[in-house]
Image (tube, rainbow, N blue to C red):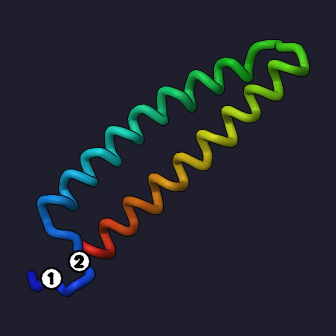
Amino acid sequence: MTQNLHSIPAEQAKEIRRLSHDLSNALEIIVQANYLLGAMSHDESAKQWIQLLDNGVVQAADINRSLREYIVAHS
């Protein structure tokens, strides 16, 4: 396989894929805990914190997905 100037070297791409996979696993734990928290009754303040957590998890998952797509496209 020929690499162009904008390609990520194979060894680095492999390590970034591994880190991205580990991040996905950690995010899944947070998603599940957040889901369980959301299923419980809370006061309005706690609901706002749970929503904030949910938004952060969605953003992190989107960034991780974009990172994986970038690695695939450039390695």
Quadrant for residue 6, please give it. bottom left
Residue at 41% x, 60% y: name it: 67
**In the current view of this chain or complex, which residue is farthest to the front?**
5
**Element under label 1?**
loop
Seen in the picture, residue 72 relative to 5 is either above or below; the reply is above
Give how far across and how far down residue 19 sits, in percent: 29, 45
Count of numbered tags: 2
| Left or right position of 22 against 75 | right
66 shown above or below 16: below
Q: Is residue 48 left or right of residue 2?
A: right
Q: Quadrant of the C terminus?
A: bottom left
Q: Which mark is residue 3?
A: 1
Q: Do tag 2 and tag 1 residues touch (Cβ < 8 Å)?
A: yes
Residue position for label 2: 7
Element at badge 2?
loop
Residue 55 figure quarter: top right
42 to the left or right of 29: right
As shown in the figure, which amino acid type bears the numbered disc 2? Answer: Ser
Q: Residues within 10 Å of mark 1 (few under 14, many from 20)?
A: few
Kindly identify the residue that appears in the image at 34 percent across and 48 percent down.
Answer: 20
